[in-house]
Structures are given as C-alpha cells and as structure tokens.
Image (cartoon, rainbow, N blue to C red):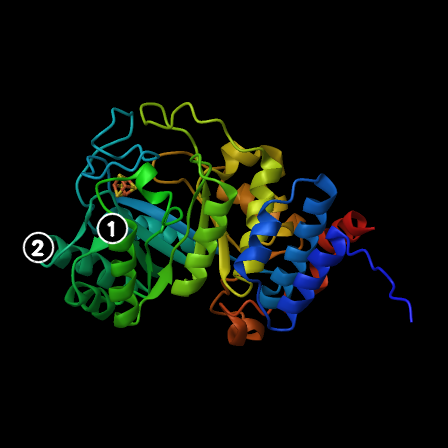
Amino acid sequence: MSSVQVDVTNRDRIQGLCDRILQGGSVDREEALWLFELEDQADITDLMASANRIRQHFKGNRIHLCSIVNAKAGGCSENCKFCSQSAAYTTASPRYGFVDAEPLRHASDEAKQNQVTAVGLVAAWKGLREGPVLDEVCDRIREMAADGKVRPDASLGLIESQEVANRLKEAGLACYGHNLESSRRFFPEHCTTHSFEDRLRTIGFLKQAGIKICSGGIIGMGESRADRCDLAMELRAIDASVVPVNFLNPIEGTPYENMEPLPPMEILKTIACFRFILPGKEIMVAGGRTVNLRDLQGMIFMAGASALMVGNYLTTLNQSVEKDLQMLRDLGLSPDWVPEDDSDHQGCAQKSCGCEAENQAKPMEAALTAGQA
Ligand code: SF4
C-alpha cells in the first residue's frame, strides 16, 4: 500500500490550531512561537481571521471598555525606560500628588456617560505599603464603589504584603492592574530598580486577596518575538483576567525616544497571537494605539481584541471616546456595559453574550469572509 504525502499549508495549520482552541484546547509554546514568527501577509490575514473567530466564540460581539485616571503623576523612583513619569528622565510629563475625591467623581460621571465599565486609579510610584497613603487610597476606592457609577479599579505599583492587598479588597477593589511588561528574560533590559519576580509576588498577594488581575505588557521596546510569546505564556500561567497590550509610544526624554515603531501588521499579528494563547480572556488594546495604528485601529477587533482603553492615557492623548464608540458601531460591536433600565440585557451585563450585537455583526463578518476567500 503506497502512502500519500499530504502537504499541510500554513493556512491548514492555523485553522487546525484555531479548531482545537474552539473545542476547548490550547496551543503550546512551540506552536505559539510559530504563530508569532509568521511573516507572509496572507498568513497574517488567515491568523487574524481565526483569532477573530476565537474572539467571537468566547466573547461575543461585546467590547469591554476601561479608562484610567492619573491619580498621582510623575516623580516615580523607578527607571522603566518607556515611562515619562520616571524621575530618572527629563520629560514634559506633569507632576502632582495623590488626587482628592472631586476629579475622581468627574471621571466616574464621564465614564458612565460613555458606557465605560471601569475607571482605574493609576499612581506613578514604586508601590503601596501600610500607612497614611494606603488609608487615602482606600478612601478613594470606597467613595467610588459607593457612588456605584463605575467599577473602581487600581494600578498602584508593587504591593508589599498580604495585608495591603486585603485592605484594598475590603475597600471594594475588584480588579488590580499590574503589568508584567515583558518576558522574564527581557525585563531587566527596560527596568533595573525592581524585578519581574517582584511583580509576580505582588500578583500573588492580589490573587490571594480575591482581587481580579489585569496584567499585560508593552510591545515594541526592542524585545524579540520569542519574548512576546513568553510574556503571553506567563500571563496565561498567572491567569490574568484582563490583558492590556500596549504598543510603545516613544516619549521624548526617555531612553526609548528614538525607538523605531513596529509596523502595524506586526502589531495586529501580535494581538492575534495573544488571542490564540489567551482565548477566553479580555485582550485589551491600551497605550500607543492611535500613534502606532492610525487608520488601522478598527482592525484590532478583527485581530482578536475584545477590550479597549478609551479616553486619554496617563500622559498622552488618545482619539475621542465618541470616535471609539462610532468605530464599534461601524463594526457591529457594542460596549459590554448595560444601562440599568435595559431589562432585556440585565442578565448578560459584563458577560459578553453578544445578544444585542448579534444582528448588527454583518459589516465585520462580511469583511472577514472576504479576507478568507
Ligand atoms: S513604576 Fe510605573 S510610574 Fe514608575 S517608572 Fe515604572 S512604569 Fe513609570
């Protein structure tokens, strides 16, 4: 009996991995790295189409929206090379101490008006320990939680003990942002004042306290594709619920000010690879979207993103929230926030069931079908 040689094309292999994920399976590191290394435009388009199918399968057509408030700006003791808020570099970024309640009330009002689910308090400092600053942080979180307009999140650096994490939880914090930033190997290339292990330790305290983890990284700092792959694998290992993917926006005065931007197709491919590795998670495109993707921003959802950071970033501007909401409508997508009086959808708020958007999904489906043909 003669054996028949069957050529497995890249398209077949991508499709096979996608089918496995849709059936509840996963990709291993070798398979994931192969995806990151794809170069051919047609392969990347196939990859994005499959990543979009995975997104739709796990997240429906609802998009999770978050915004952030710079609750304490500038003068940070750490030396992260991408950051304009580090005291180690001379940049035009503002400096002020921890904000009081009024700006946060304003941010909550604005977020609710724009159908944004959560507002994160972000502070430029090394981290949090027991003391008057922690008391103040807990007061702000308690006030926002009591106000009930949005979910208060926070990103306040390293946490020094289990007690600190427990106090944040008691104050009403549901989700804490703490990026791993890059792979374990690449981390010391961009920061030497604290370590990857310090970040993992903080995440351990937060998980122990029952706080959801929002953790991702920054792409485009000179790391390799293998580093991006390893970052995504680490995020899978820590079981991050929300995965912000930032793309370097080189800031004048920082060591990365002259870093070459990544080509938009490399960025879209990276998002698609993250969707393959983290199929059921919220993959959120965050900083650097506007400056790096320009007119291709809408394609992030076709590449598998299911969440979006809206409003201005900590020290840089974003496109307007109105424009982002219009972009979602044009693609047949809608925010996962549900108004209190929308009784048809009360049961599916935050669950991304896609019921409302199901009948509007045609524009993007049509675009992808054309891409696969
Ligand atoms: S710890 Fe945060 S605020 Fe401080 S330099 Fe690093 S990224 Fe910037």
Quarter of the image where ligand 1 sits: top left
Residue neighbourhood size for the residue with mark 1, other residues' Cα within 10 Å, grouped as few (<14), some (14–19), many (≥20): some
Name the amino acid, label 1: Gly
Which element type, helix, strand or loop, lies under badge 1? Answer: loop
Residue 77 percent across, percent down from the top left: 18, 38
Q: Nearer the viewer, mark 1 or mark 2?
A: 1
Is residue 369 shown above or below 170?
Answer: above
Query: Which residue sits at x=28%, y=65%?
Result: 204
Asked if disc 1 is less than 8 Å from ligand 1, the answer is yes
Q: Answer with mark 1 or mark 2, whichever residue precedes in sequence.
A: 2
214 or 362, which is in the foreground? 214
126 or 185, which is in the foreground? 185
Residue 328 percent across, percent down from the top left: 60, 50
Q: What is the distance, in whole Å, between disc 1 and disc 2 at their CAs?
A: 16 Å
Residue 326 can be seen in this image = no
Question: Residue pushed farthest left?
Answer: 131
Query: Which residue sits at x=36%, y=54%?
Result: 119
Q: Residue 304 is drawn in which quadrant?
A: bottom right
- The mark found on residue 202 in the picture is none
Which residue is tagged 2? 132
Residue 121 percent across, percent down from the top left: 29, 51
306 or 259, which is in the foreground? 259
Quadrant location of the N terminus? bottom right
Query: Which residue sits at x=20%, y=69%?
Result: 166
Which element type, helix, strand or loop, lies under badge 2? Answer: helix
Which residue is tagged 1? 157
